[in-house]
Amino acid sequence: MFSFSKKTYLIASLLLALLLSACGQNVKLYRKAEKEYKQGLYEESLRSNTESLKLKRTHIKAQELLKKNFSGIVASRENRIESLKRSGSPDIWDKLVNEYTELISLQKLVEPFNPLYNPKTGMPYDFQLKDYSKDLAASKENAAEYHYSKAMAMIQKGTMPDTQKEAVRELMAAQSFVPNYKDSTARLGEARKLAVKRIAILTFDDKTGTDNRYGGIFDMLTESIIGKLVQDKEAGEFMKIVTRSQIEQVLAERQLSAPAETDAAYASNIGSMLGAHEIMTGKILQINYIAPQKIHQDLKETDKITTKQKVVDEKGKKKKQDITTEISCEYTKFTKTAEVQIIASFSLVEVSTGRVKLQDTVKAEFPWSDIWARFKSGDEKALTPATQALIKKTEPMPPSEIEMVNTALMSLSDSIVDKVRNYVK
């Protein structure tokens, strides 16, 4: 058991260690704050400075830096606010909300040290903190009204999804400043419904000249795009995909058949029948299959082995001695490659106006390669384990041509879906 004096000593030592650690950290934070101040990073300096004073409130240099820095920051922010008020900028209220929010946040950092007492003179220093809450509330109210008014203007333009989507964004902005501002919640629900685009995706045309060599890959590409977009919850907020069965039903009811090549008039006609806002048409332009090719490289590896051999010394006595011998092995390393490249183009056309809303060309590749090796001559013990494994490996076979095409096709559909997703957001 420790004696009382030993326990007291240990506690005192621990407290001293903690005190020294806090002092050391305090100095580091102050130096960091000082460096940031000299670099013109005033608000970053303020944050480091207040962390320093939390550890040692009586640090005079940290106190002086805080007083000098804080008054300059407030003056700078207030000057910026006055400039904004004179600017007449349309989004003045959004910017003022940010300025007042930052001012309040910065004051909260200093508030625990107000007043700040000089450890030598005992004289207090008052930071003269201001109440910006009313200014912030008024700015939020005006910002909400600004975005609400913009939303109303969008709603009055008509029921087209693009304008309604803008209205949704403006109403959400209004609510970010003042929750449930006026009737924004009800308006938001209505605008969300009208902002959803119905998009029909027609089967991609074959412009590859492959004479149906790859079967129904054009249907497969279309189905893949539809399936991925239907399952995409984020894109689904402003988009509804017309199913293939709906398209086929309309074609059957109107006794229409898909033409050899989809033109704008045909696409627009089908889109109108489906009640679609936009319709996607596309073409697979090229399918380039590079058949398996094999190249080889003759290589050599060397190593040293040590064996025990019987030798006769100068006195005629037999003994065992380590003998180091360099060995080598020659082998051939083979590399087999194959590749598929698919290029397609697509367009999203607004049915009511015939305007192209999105158009792009995409490319997908599926490169395949593998290696193996074969022994030529020499001592196989000179080979590394990795090379020995390559020699034991059977000659690899690439996926079939149709498998490679299908894999590249899925990558192609991913690229198209990404572009559509970004467009409808």
Image (spheres, grey):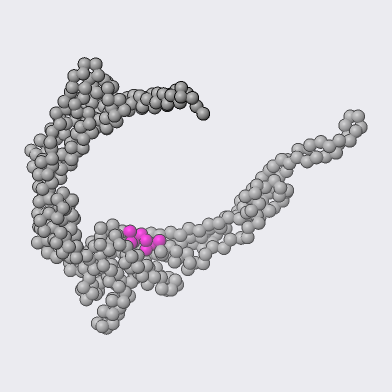
Is 153 positioned to the left or the right of 235 in the image? left
Residues 337 and 423: in front is: 423
- For image coordinates 26% across by 67% down, the residue present is 240
The image quarter containing residue 208 is bottom left
Residue 116 percent location from the top left of the image: 21, 24
Find residue 76 and report its image quarter: top left
Image location of residue 354, percent across then percent down: 20, 67
Say left or right for 115 vs 153.
right
User: Which residue is at a point 52% across and 64% down the rendered structure image?
Assistant: 399
Residue 275, position as x, y percentages in the image: 21, 73
Query: Residue placed farthest to the right in the image?
Result: 316
Does residue 50 show up? yes
Q: Residue at x 46, y 62 (%)?
A: 340
- The C terminus, quarter of image: bottom left
Q: Position of residue 94 (x, y in %)?
A: 15, 45
Res. 265 visible in picture: no
What's the residue at 30%, 62% (across, down)?
Answer: 233
Is residue 50 in the magenta section?
no
Please name whichever residue, 131 or 359, is drawn nearer the observer in this view of the structure.
131
In terms of depth relative to the viewer, which is nearer, 288 or 92? 92
Q: Residue furthest top?
A: 121
Majority secondary structure of magenta residues: helix
Instruction: Tell me if residue 384 comes above or below residue 34 in the rendering.
Output: below
User: Is 284 above or below relative to 10?
Assistant: below
248 vs 286, left or right, is left
Mark count: 0
Q: Which residues are magenta?
A: 411-418
- Residue 235 in which image quadrant: bottom left
